[in-house]
Image: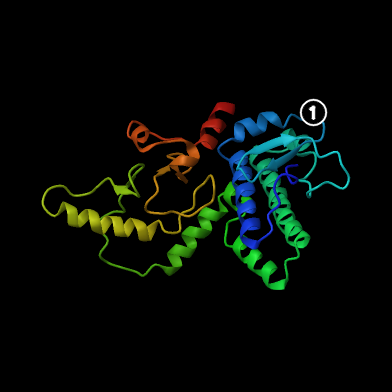
Amino acid sequence: MDGGAYNPRTVEEVFRDFKGRRAALIKALTTDVEEFYQQCDPEKENLCLYGFPSEQWEVNLPAEEVPPELPEPALGINFARDGMQDKDWLSLVAVHSDAWLLSVAFYFGARFGFDKSDRKRLFGMINDLPTVFEVVTGVAKKQGKESHSSNKPKSNSKRGSEPQVVKYSKGLISKDEDEGEGEDEDEEGLEEEDEEEHGETLCGACGESYAADEFWICCDICEKWFHGKCVKITPARAEHIKQYKCPSCSNKRARS
């Protein structure tokens, strides 16, 4: 629907457009899921879920012009809302959203004459990101753990039981850090272990990977990790949260 205002012409621009739309759709299906659910009223006409390069999403009627300026998302997602379980419905919308994202990206590629190497490079950049479906269903997190587990060397130097992780700070901090002499050395070692262990962790909201210089928070219910900025939690606020529940888990409890 917003295709007329922005037309990316290079591989990098199309990929940036793809990432913005993808982030918007993931937001609708995870952190904003309650609002998305309410907007998809089955009593309304055929509705579509749109994601924009600005990372904003919208539920609206399809474009009236034929053919449309851009490929259109799946039509009538609201009609299926009450006919299946919430998680199955969200998964279905996620699958259609993935198909729409690819169609938009390669529409731009065709429109601006991407050759074989450009198309291959664009697909490679897209394929390096988890799909919307993988993020929404948690498959991306599972795949990241399996990949990390298969690549991690075995070591007998692990200190006692696996340290619990505090949900705030720059990077991650262990709850069972030793105090007193040698504290700085232990903290440095733990930070390196945390960076290695969480290197493949993916944000449950945007699907991007863990970075040590970013603030993260873990949901105590589903145990998914989130960028603080994605769930609007700051380090200062996290210090006062005894049990953090992500938007998705909070909404599930509210509906039940």
Task: Pick whichever, 27 or 120, lies toward us.
Answer: 120
Whether residue 128 appears in this view of the structure is yes
- Given the current orientation, which residue lies at the most extreme left position? 181
Query: How many numbered dots are placed on residues in this image?
Result: 1
Disc 1 marks which amino acid? Lys
Residue 30 vs 125, above or below: the answer is: above
Q: Quadrant of residue 117?
A: bottom right
Q: Which colour scheme is used?
A: rainbow
Residue 239 vs 173, above or below: the answer is: above
State the image coordinates of residue 219 (x, y, percent, origin top left).
Answer: 44, 40
State the image coordinates of residue 18 (x, y, percent, origin top left).
Answer: 64, 53
Residue 37 vs 227, above or below: the answer is: above
Q: Which residue is located at x 72 percent, y 44 percent? A: 5
> Which residue position is annotated with label 1?
44
Q: Which residue is located at x 77 percent, y 62 percent? A: 110
Q: Quadrant of residue 85?
A: top right
Would you say 225 lies left or right of 81 here? left
Q: How crowded is mark 1: few (under 14 residues within 10 Å), some or many (20 or more)?
A: few
State the image coordinates of residue 256 (x, y, percent, origin top left).
Answer: 58, 28
Q: Which residue is located at x 64 percent, y 44 percent? A: 25
Q: Which residue is located at x 46 percent, y 39 percent? A: 221
Task: Pick whichever, 46 or 150, lies toward us.
Answer: 46
Which quarter shows the N terminus? top right
- Given the current orientation, which residue lies at the most extreme right position? 66
State the image coordinates of residue 189 (x, y, percent, origin top left).
Answer: 25, 59
